[in-house]
Every structure is written in C-alpha cells, then in structure tokens.
Image: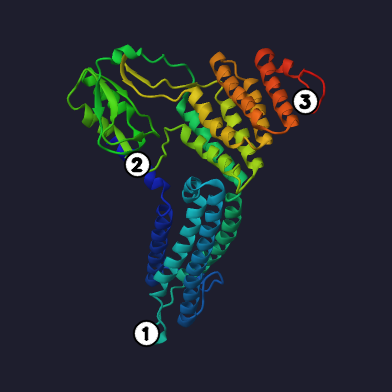
Amino acid sequence: MKARLRKFLIAISETFWLVPAAMTLLGISLAIACVQIDAAGLLPPWLLNSPLLYSGGGTGARILLGAVASSTIGVAGTVFSITIAALSLAAGQMGPRLLRNFVKDRGNQLTLGVFLATFSYALMVLRTVRTQGDGAFVPHLSLSFGILLAFVSVGTLIYFVGHMAGRINVDTVIGLVSEDVRTAIDRLTLDTRQPAPPPIEIWRDAVPVCDDRSGYLQQFDSAGLAGWAKENDAIIHLLVRPGDYVFPGAPIALVRPQTDGCEDAIRAATALGGQRGSDSDLEFPIRQLVEVAVRALSPGINDPHTAMSVIDRLGAALCDMVPRHLSTGLTLIDGRLVLVMPAITYDGLVDAMFHMIRQNGVGSTAVLIRVLEVLTAVMSCETDIMRQRTLRRHADLVLAEARQIGSQADRDTLDLRHKAFMVMMERGPVGHLFVMPAGDDKDA
C-alpha cells in the first residue's frame, strides 16, 4: 500500500489541473470574503473615500467585472491554444515524452491558475452587485481587488510569453532534463561501495512468484518487502527493477524457501503504471536526453549541434558519477540478506547513453568526434579500472563505425581522436598533450 500511495501522490503532484483548481477555489473564497466585508460595513469611512478603492456605481461595477471576466477567460483560452500548437511542434523535434516536463511545469500551472482565479473572482463578485432599482449594493473593496487581479493577470501574461519562449528552446529543455539526471544521480547512488551480490547458486532451490498484472514498475516499497521477508525468514530476489515492464503471467520474483503470502506481499510492495517514469529509475531521464539526440540526428531534422549538446551533458553526468557508487540491490537487516533486486550497472548506464546515439550518428562525423572527445574528458577523471574498460569499449565501437565513412580525412580525424583517448587512458592528461590536434600532419 505504501508503494501505491506514493505512486498516487506523485501522480497528483505532477497533474496539470491541481494548481489551477486550487487557485480557482482560492479566487472564489477571496471573493466571498471580500463581499462579506463590504456587506458588513467594516471599512472605515476614510478608506471608502480613498482613491485606492473603486468609487463608481452599480452599472459601472457590472460593466467592469464583466470586462474582467470575459477578457481573462478569453485570453486564457487563446494563449493556451497557441501553447498547445507550439508544444506539438516541439514534440516533433524533441519527442512526445518530454511533454511531461511541460505539463508539470509550475510556471504554466500558475499562469492558468491566475487567469481562472481572476475569472472566478469576477463572476462571484458580479452576482452580488445591485443597481439602484434592485436595492443598491456596490462592494467597493471587492471591485478594487478585482481591478488588482486584472493587472496581475496582465503581468502574468507577459511572464508566460517569455517563459514559454524559453521553455520550448531545445537547449533549455536539455538543461532541464540534465538537472533531472544530476538529481537522480545524487539520490540513487551511494558514497560507499555496497557488498557484491550473493552467488547465483543460492537461488537453485528458489520458487518463482508469478504476477498476472502488466505495466511498468513505477514505485517499489523495498523497506516494506524486506521487513516482510525478515519476519518470515525468507530471501526474495526481485526480477524487475523500477522502470522495467512486468509481463502478465511472467515471474516477478524468486523466493527461498517457499513462503505463504509472498505473492500478496510483493503485490502490496509494487505499483505498476502504463507509462515508464519513476523517481527510482536512473535510466529514465538519461533516455529522455538520448531521445532528443536521436531525433536531432534523424534525416528530417538533421541537427547535429543539438546531439552534441546532449553528448556533453551525458559526459558531465559520467563525471558526476566518478566519486559515487551504484547500488548492488542488496537489502540487509541485522546483517542478514533478505532482499535482492536487479541493479543498474555502469556498463548498462553507459550503454544507455551512447549506443543509440552512435548507431544513429554514423552519418555525422562531427557527432562521432564529439563522442570520442567526451569519452576522453570522462577518462581524464575516472580512476576505476572496470569503468575505464567500459569507456574504452565505447571508444572502440565509435572507431569501428569510422569504417563506414567515405572520406579518408574524416576517418583520419576519428583515428586521431581515438588515439588521444588511448593516450589519456594510459598516460593521463600530461600524455594527452602530446597528441597532435586534428589536421596536423605529424604523428602522435
């Protein structure tokens, strides 16, 4: 239940309608409160005669509030119609999955909330205004607040135009997703190395636990499932991790020994959804970045500079990971192993970063060169031998792609960049200085 509750709360926090709905209710509440103050005659005479408050009659008040209500709802509809068109164009260039970032953007939500709150406020106050023939009642304080909200709406419109112009810029989107990558690295990696997973022999007598549900694993309550395993003297090996797809009828876990209630415990500790997206899935924001690069390399867009910008951010993420350690997926309670779940490896992470970009960038020598340059920069600060081997494997794969390039000059440039990578790996930054830059006819 904890996993499902967390999934529900995250889904609610990322919905587009929550903030506008709350601000609309706030506008209605403010209108009722201001009208009550006006009706009770609580305003001092000096304030009623102040130029800061509305001093017109009932007819003018109706016209004013009607103009505020009609203009705010009209502007809101027009602006957001144009926004949907702009986002459709942006989705074609950067990928529809990135629209999730626009939907949960607080600036967009607050803008719509201000317009709807002003509209609702004006309507609620308008229904209380009475002319002389109906028994005159003009809520001066309420009218003054309505005018103030109208000016706030004008300022919000100016803010929104500039905000959206920046948001649909591809560099801004790349920067925002890169921040998501950095946040995920800080949250999902460790300061110290965890113990290695147990040998697979301990699972020979394990019993598979099947699940008839389907969908992406979005939330997982590891603490709750580990506590259940400890209470029942069991060891559970989960076969999926957050972000993986659960197939109906397929085993979702292994348990040793067979324990009654294990299937219900796993079901309670996991929450599935129709879309991939989890705060425990390190690959998800990385794949969003990669999607931007792959689309930029498509023949219809052909924007290698965007792809190179993504490659730079991926390299920065790998540099951020240098002092960090990936989890091995083990949960121990009182020194006893109770839960094992699949853990992302450094190999898998780098594969997710560069495989698709390299495969789609074969026709762009500049992109392949940039991949080698970024790998060289990461190698300059990475000291772990196993991680260095992973980086070299990808550098070798890029060099292998050079055989498909028709220009000998381009192949020579890639070969020189690969040589610089190897020197950085073997001799460090000092040795890297002795590799001549591209275009020099001297040997390194």
Q: In 3D space, how far apart are the residues under numbered discs 1 and 2 (Cα atoms)?
A: 57 Å
Position in image of residue 332 (x %, y %): 33, 17
What residue type is disc 1 on? Asp
Within the image, what quadrant is residue 256 found in?
A: top left
Which residue is under mark 2?
Answer: 273
Q: Is residue 125 visible?
A: yes
The image's colour scheme reads rainbow
Q: Residue at x 48, y 72 (%)?
A: 70
Residue in front for this viewpoint, 138 or 376: 376
Q: Residue at x 50, y 50 (%)?
A: 102
Q: Is residue 243 left or right of residue 148?
A: left
Q: Is residue 216 left or right of residue 82?
A: left
Marks counted in the figure total 3
Q: In 3D space, how far apart are the residues under numbered discs 2 and 3 (Cα atoms)?
A: 50 Å
Tag 3's secondary structure? loop
Q: Residue at x 39, y 70 (%)?
A: 124
Position in image of residue 185 (x %, y %): 50, 29
Which residue is under mark 3?
Answer: 437
Q: Quadrant of the image for the N terminus?
A: top left
Label 2 crowd bin: few (<14), some (14–19), many (20+), radius 10 Å: some
With respect to residue 394, does 42 lie above or below? below
